[in-house]
Image: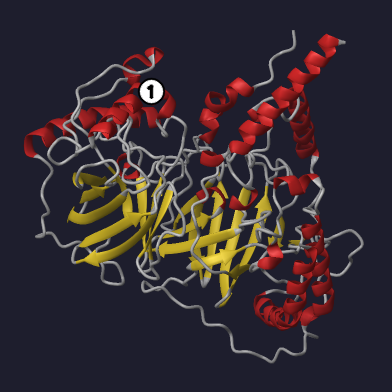
Amino acid sequence: MRHRILVSLRGMAVALVVALVATITVTGQTQAPAAKVAPAKAAPATKPYTVPRTLDGQPDLQGFWTSATYVPLERPNGVTKEIYTPDEAEAAIKRAAEREAEQTEPGTTADVHYDFTQFGLDRSQSTFSRNLRTSLIVDPPDGKMPPLNAEGQKRAQERAAARKAAGGQYDAVENMPIGSRCIIMGGSGPPLMSAGYNSNYQIVQSPGYVMILTEMIHDVRVIPLDGRPAPPSGVRQWMGVSRGRWEGDTLIVETTNFNGKNAFRGSSENLKVTERFTRTADDVLQYRFTIEDPSTWSRSWTAEAPLAKTDGPIFEFACHESNYGIANILAGARADEKKAAEKKGSN
Amino acid sequence: MRNRFLIATTTACAVAGLVLAMTGVAAQTPAYRAPRTPDGKPNLNGIWQTMNTANWNIEAHSAAPSPVRDLGATGAVPGGAGIVEGGEIPYLPAARKKQQENYANRLKLDPEVNCYLPGVPRSMYLPYPFQIIQSAKHIMMVHEYAGAVRTIYMSEQTEAPADSWMGWSNGRWEGETLVVDTKGFNDLSWFDRAGNFHSEALHVVERFTPRSAETLTYEATIEDPKVFSKPWKISMPLYKHVERNAQLMEFRCVEFVEDLLYGHLRKQPSK
């Protein structure tokens, strides 16, 4: 397994440097830090990208995209720069890809479930979004999430206490992670985040609507662009309620009305996510999101996580329908308890 | 909101059933020419829903009590004239027997009870709205129930890469009609709550024809030589949601069935 990854990485290295340089010119057009990146000298001044249009004149964002990336949300401890050199970025990707392969090292617990690299579930074997940033977070400038405010800390403690009171993770289905229960996966968003695998999306536009399909558990957001207000606050959903509009070539989507059960990094149901989608190349969809939740953080924070074009189509992800894992895990825990009780009885 | 809507639907269903029984579903009305999308095709965009009792039973049926006593009249079955052309599904003899067994065990076996994906054509007449998002290359059918979704490939068409609940749909335009050919099903979905079923050999050809600004005629030919003696047809109108701010709501029902499916595996309080 291990050597297969390394081989593919080696093959990738040359292409990677070229791609990274290309990415820099693309992001450089719109983002403030461009000046710092200017030493990426290979990039000649390019004409601004002309965003293709749909037949009814909208910027055309359609196609298959992936949010898979090795860039962490928060800047790693010890890293002080905002932008890596291409060599540093390549080394960071290589380290991350090796860690990903190691999680299924033969003989480990993870390997019993499935081998990521064998089935191509690791990111490095398919398209992933390349980015020289050391963190997805661009604001605050230190690349870290702002600290939880008092209300956010209190809620985090209450949630931890409630989890503890509910018993062990394998005591009942409600105690297990919502992803394992096939309710919703991390990458469904908003915001769209790189998930463990299959971080793929399909965008389809029709007059007045943009639809974003997330591969993981076939989650769909149908976003109206007609300026209608969000529904009353009594409507609460796992993915919130999204409203979109165009500002120039950028699609802006604001999402509120979350139910708070799929907390994003500790967020509450007062979370508001503002996403900005801008096509900056045929194969790059610049994606920037701002998180506001006065019940959790005293200031907003923003991340930039470009989506890369990938090949379709997306196949059905019938997660709940085939969720043998959850029944087997619970049954296994009950069998262990029974065995322990018998042992105790026979002593 | 939802409750009120369901009650309204149920009432409307009874009326619709009566009207259908008297007139039959309107045959194609080629006189109507739908507004066009930017690429010149009939515009099917919108939020649609049926107004009939097909999800209880696609064959003709009388009103019946709820299979769950405590639901009283709210869980009862409204009668309906059915949507099957000729009235009855042409089952092979053994298959009819299996349908009857399915019906008897429907609380355990109906995929809808377990929040499983609905399959095709059942997704089209569930008592929930669905939205069509139409582009030149892909036509999306996004269903409120369980967040089920189907991509209809209008170009770059391929065979189904593997079997699935919602099948693999390739579409084409025949004049005013969108024709969708779907194969690659698994054998797990049902047609309704009455246990009508199919095998993995199911092949569905659907026809969506605009019949007025706010209605479509939906027809489907259903073929499955392992279960039916010959192909058969269903047809019904689809109605557009015209209320302001109509939108699909989340109906993420997995959470609603977890105790039903896994409750028996809960840790028992120690004695």
Q: Residues within 10 Å of mark 1 (few under 14, many from 20)?
A: few
In terms of depth relative to the viewer, which is nearer, B1 or B111?
B111
- Please give the name of the residue rendered at 79% of the width and 70% of the height, measured from the top-left corner: A6
Question: Badge 1 is on which residue?
Answer: B105
Q: Observer-nearest residue: B135 or B46?
A: B135
User: What colour scheme was applied to this rendering of the protein?
Assistant: secondary structure
| Residue B135 % position (x, y) | 37, 65
Position of the C terminus of chain A by quadrant: top right
Q: Residue furthest bottom?
A: A44
Percent of width and height locating residue A278? 57, 70
- Residue at the extreme right: A78
| Percent x, y of residue A153 | 80, 37
Q: Residue furthest front?
A: B94
Rendered-image quadrant of the N terminus of chain A: bottom right
Chain of residue at mark 1: B
Q: Is residue A64 visible?
A: yes
| Mark 1: amino acid | Asn
A253 left or right of B87 in image? right
Q: Residue at x 47, y 42 (%)?
A: A231
Vertically, is A133 above or below B61?
Answer: below
Against B148, residue A181 (above or below) is above
Q: Residue at x 58, y 26 (%)?
A: B262
Q: Nearer the viewer, residue B242 or B95?
A: B95
In the image, B102: left or right of A192? left
Q: Secondary structure at mark 1?
A: loop
